[in-house]
Amino acid sequence: MTESAHPLPDLDPQARKTVLRQISYGLYAITAAHHGERGIFTANWLTQVSFDPPLLALSVERESSTLRLIRESGRFAVCPLAEGQRELAGNIGRPRAKAGDKFAAYDLATFDSAAGVPILADTLGWLVCRVTAEVPAGDSVLLLAEVIEAQVLRDGVPLTMRSAGFRHAG
Amino acid sequence: MTESAHPLPDLDPQARKTVLRQISYGLYAITAAHHGERGIFTANWLTQVSFDPPLLALSVERESSTLRLIRESGRFAVCPLAEGQRELAGNIGRPRAKAGDKFAAYDLATFDSAAGVPILADTLGWLVCRVTAEVPAGDSVLLLAEVIEAQVLRDGVPLTMRSAGFRHAG
């Protein structure tokens, strides 16, 4: 559905990158599981897209090892990270090919939701979402999903890309 | 593409709302024009979704008067607002049915991009995007779009929903 680029002659790649980095993001642990296999990664390309029904859109890189688990189970969880969880965000953001089993490597405390999705404990809260549509989006896949479970875990200020000093845009 | 809800029995609407409000957002002026008619509104449900090609996803309420202009022209601009532009964000966030011609009512300074999209001056910068796909998303429409023009206007801290004290999530 995504056509190739037809940029105007005066498109400045550096300006494009700078303005794309003026977009504000939070940081989220995304989890999924299928047949006992679990995956987790750090995402920032996430937004609500509808109030009724409550829908989210999440962009996932095509090479993500967790994407297969999301597709097979049709479910994922969104766990908003809190200020102070910058190192955690960095750890679970490492590729599985380098970090191995991140749940074991970083001693991540988890519990299962009613739908069987592993939830990262000690985050601000969590949502389990059911994928309702998948849209090709360049080097990534955009998942539309409906919230089917939710729990608040604690008060706190959400971790943002800006406060973490991270960049993943441009 | 969006199926109706099948929530688990224990879905708590208040918990869902609270966790959805843990998602972080910036604030953006979105503009479009077609055959001399111009539209502008405030958005927060926006995210980049691909690096290559550079794609954004923007959720627009179905009743938005600017949505028709975006559809007819196939273009919109994203202008990230800066800290200090909270009142501006509130003004251009008013429905056209109540505010009338917001460009005139709020004396908005604009200029046209090469592609002919009106740009709100005095924002941090702007991107003109070409719509590549439209996905139904509950009460809204999710637009996928490729960046075709970009300009940095000035340095500054992006305005966020949190810093503005606004809520549009849950």
Image (cartoon, coloured by chain):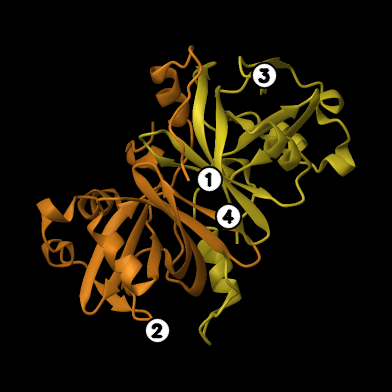
Chain colours: A orange, B yellow
The reply to whether discs 4 and 3 touch (Cβ–Cβ < 8 Å) is no
- Distance Cα–Cα, label 2 vs label 1: 29 Å
- Distance Cα–Cα, label 4 vs label 1: 12 Å
Within 10 Å of disc 1 (Cα), the crowding (few <14, some 14-19, many 20+) is many
Closer to the eye: label 3 or 1? 3
Within 10 Å of disc 2 (Cα), the crowding (few <14, some 14-19, many 20+) is few
Q: Chain of mark 2?
A: A
Name the residue beneath numbered marker 3: B116
Residue A56 in picture, x, y percent from top left: 51, 59
Specify the quadrant of the image occupied by residue B143: top right
Closer to the eye: label 2 or 4? 4
Q: Chain of mark 4?
A: A
Q: Chain of mark 1?
A: B
Q: Judging from the image, what secondary structure is the residue with disc 1 in?
A: loop
Name the residue beneath numbered marker 2: A114
The front one of A140 and A37 is A140
Figure check: B154 above or below A58 = above
- Distance Cα–Cα, label 3 vs label 2: 51 Å
- Given the image, on which type of amino acid does mark 3 rest? Gly
The answer to which of marks 3 and 1 sits earlier in the sequence is 1
Q: Residue A134 vs residue A123: left or right?
A: right
